[in-house]
Image (tube, rainbow, N blue to C red):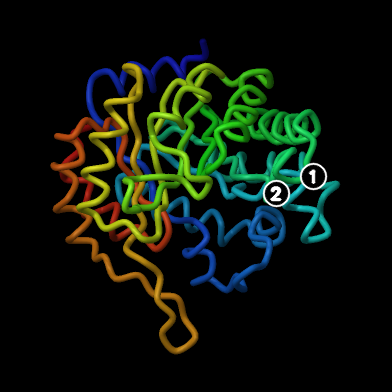
Amino acid sequence: MTSRVASFRATLARRPILGDGATGTQLQQRGLAPGAGGELWNIDHADRVTDVHRAYLAAGADLLTTNTFGGTSYVLGNHGAGARVRDLNVAGACLARAVAGERAWVLGDIGPFGGMLEPLGDAVADEVALAFREQAAALLEGGADLILVETMSDPAEAALAVTAAKAAGAECVIATYTFQKSAAGYRTMMGTTVADAFPAVLAAGADIVGANCGTELSLDDYVALTAELVAHAAGRPVIVQPNAGSPRLVDSKICYDESAAQFAAVVPRLLAAGARIVGGCCGSTPEHIAAMAKHFSK
């Protein structure tokens, strides 16, 4: 086990860990057009990506997440960059690594590949697995300490990504789903409950499990969801990364209503519910993370 991963595990056993916040919405504030391939900025506008990482580190984040959410060949192919997987992911990890130094750990970010696996869709599982492994290997090459498989809805896809990350050499893999609230409780877009979502990623070797995003979930919902996550995590540490409320379009701009103070106020409840890592997702900012930091001893 590398010293950085060992130090992460030791710290997590000793105290809760503070994650960072959103990347995409922060890059949009710096000029990224909605729907554009933000991963290309790891090379084309590296200074702006670095600026986001520096802001989160200054806010007190223990974890810096690479700007590689859409870094598989499938998603990059939509931006004419399907052949640039290694370069863009290595660059993204290097940017976060350079800012983190010894003060924070780097999460190599892997999001959904953007399609549906057979038989619901036409994507072949073996080919998707190779794409995830290619991305994970590049992130580790660039200096990522851990791999984050996030915003998943399909347990089969999530398990493929976790297995691929482990096969690429990741010593610690985090797997998170995005849940919505329904009359039947918290479920993914595929209709999967927490109880049914976790076994696949745990069997694949996920070391930490949890939830992120959830555009229709309030912070109160996230407290209730956290308790459910902990109940089904089979003893693994749990991570939660709420959105800063539901997105609203105001004067052609996407806005999020949950304030930094509201985020800070809910942290004790999330920790009391059993979360060991707390950060933010869409709409959260360095100000949100800085407000939360008072609840995390160093």
Residue at horizontal 18 percent and vertical 53 percent from the top: 264
Residue at horizontal 85 percent and vertical 46 percent from the top: 83
Mark 2 element type: loop
Camera-nearest residue between 90 and 224: 224
- In this figure, which residue is indicated by the disc labeled 1? 122
Determine crowd level at label 2: few under 14, some 14-19, many 20+ residues with C-alpha closer than 10 A. Answer: some
Amino acid type, callout 1? Asp
Residue at horizontal 53 percent and vertical 69 percent from the top: 28
| x and y, in percent, of residue 182 in the image | 35, 53
Question: Total marks drawn?
Answer: 2
- Quick one: quadrant of the C terminus? top left
- In this figure, which residue is indicated by the disc labeled 2? 115
| x and y, in percent, of residue 295 in the image | 16, 41
Apparent side of residue 173 relative to residue 121 in the rendered image (left or right): left
Asked if residue 85 is positioned above or below residue 104 in the image, the reply reads below
Camera-nearest residue between 290 and 187: 187
Mark 1 element type: loop
| x and y, in percent, of residue 267 in the image | 19, 45
Apparent side of residue 72 relative to residue 171 in the rendered image (left or right): right
Determine crowd level at label 1: few under 14, some 14-19, many 20+ residues with C-alpha closer than 10 A. Answer: few
| x and y, in percent, of residue 169 in the image | 64, 18
Apparent side of residue 43 relative to residue 4 in the rendered image (left or right): right
Q: Earlier in the sequence, mark 2 or mark 1?
A: 2
Asked if residue 268 can be seen in this view, the reply is: yes
State the residue lying farthest toward the bottom.
251
Separation of residues labelled 2 and 1 (CA atoms): 8 Å
